[in-house]
Image (cartoon, rainbow, N blue to C red):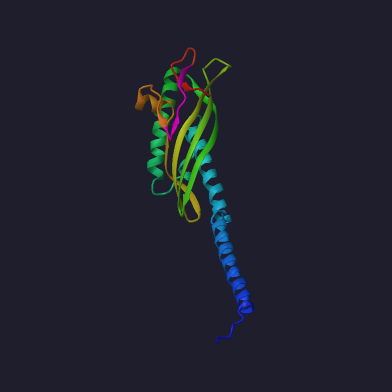
């Protein structure tokens, strides 16, 4: 006859060991998954640096209508700084400064309000999508009243690179009123999945603005 083996005592510790091992594996997976969702301090620092660089560069770019000598080159990467600076200065001169000179007025102040829609950071590269609202003042000779012009929701797409620990702009594209006139002949366009606001007119002026 076969003797009945008593397996109760060895089996119980084995089950407990196996269950504990499974629990440890599940817990480890959960922790590793959670850690991938936590932003490291360096990434948080990059996020803040990217936002600051873009915000300051956009503000400096719009300051060109008030001060044509404003320094915008400092925000660009050395590989494209001269090209981008010349492009931005030429655009502001053609669409803002020269028309103002012909009409006999000058810009005296500008306020810029950027709203960041998306920031993607991948190693030493970053892409930023933002909507920018601008309010600028102009004054005619002999008049003490300032004419305020407003543009809202100007789409910006900015590409940056990290060089020597500093985030610098490689390319910055925007679509203000004059860009839209040239590209779409006054039609509403779509940028970054958002529909731009319809243009309106300032009384006594031929300058098209966006609803602010």
Q: Position of residue 153 (x, y in %)?
A: 49, 30
Q: Position of residue 90 (x, y in %)?
A: 39, 33
Nearer-the-camera pick, 81 or 130: 130
Q: Position of residue 205 (x, y in %)?
A: 46, 15
Q: Residue furthest bottom?
A: 1
Q: Residue furthest front?
A: 1
Q: Is residue 158 left or right of residue 38?
A: left
Residue 63 seen anywhere in this rendered image of the structure: no
Query: Which residue is depicted at the point 59% across and 68% down?
Result: 19
Q: Position of residue 103 (x, y in %)?
A: 44, 18
Q: Residue furthest top?
A: 204
Relative height, residue 63 to residue 138 (above, below) = below
Query: Which residue is depicted at the point 46% across and 33% down?
Result: 155
Nearer-the-camera pick, 116 or 56: 116
- Occupied quadrant, residue 82: top left
Q: Is residue 101 left or right of residue 56?
A: left
Report how many numbered discs are placed on residues in the image: 0
- Occupied quadrant, residue 28: bottom right
Residue 206 seen anywhere in this rendered image of the structure: yes
Quarter of the image with the N terminus in it: bottom right
Magenta highlight range: 191-201
Query: Which residue is depicted at the point 54% across and 32% down?
Result: 112
Nearer-the-camera pick, 45 or 192: 192
Q: Is residue 95 magenta?
A: no
Relative height, residue 64 to residue 18 (above, below) = above
Query: Which residue is depicted at the point 42% across and 34% down?
Result: 89
Q: Is residue 97 left or right of residue 43?
A: left
């Amino acid at each position: 006859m076969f003797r009945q083996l008593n397996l109760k005592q060895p089996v119980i510790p084995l089950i407990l060991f196996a269950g504990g091992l499974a629990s440890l594996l599940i817990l480890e997976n959960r922790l590793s998954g959670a850690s991938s969702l936590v932003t490291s301090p360096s990434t948080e620092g990059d996020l803040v640096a990217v936002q600051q660089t873009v915000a300051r560069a956009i503000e400096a770019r719009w300051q060109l209508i008030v001060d044509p000598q404003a320094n915008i080159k400092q925000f660009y990467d050395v590989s494209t700084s001269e090209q981008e600076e010349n492009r931005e200065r030429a655009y502001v001169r053609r669409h803002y400064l020269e028309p103002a000179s012909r009409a006999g007025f000058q810009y005296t102040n500008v306020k810029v309000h950027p709203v960041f829609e998306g920031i993607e950071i991948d190693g030493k590269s970053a892409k930023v999508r933002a909507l920018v609202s601008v309010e600028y003042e102009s004054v005619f000779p002999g008049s003490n009243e300032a004419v305020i012009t407003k543009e809202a929701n100007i789409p910006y797409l900015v590409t940056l690179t990290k060089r020597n620990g500093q985030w610098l702009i490689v390319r910055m594209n925007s679509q203000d009123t004059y860009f839209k006139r040239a590209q779409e002949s006054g039609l509403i366009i779509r940028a970054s999945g958002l529909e731009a606001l319809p243009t309106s007119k300032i009384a006594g002026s031929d300058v098209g603005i966006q609803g602010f």
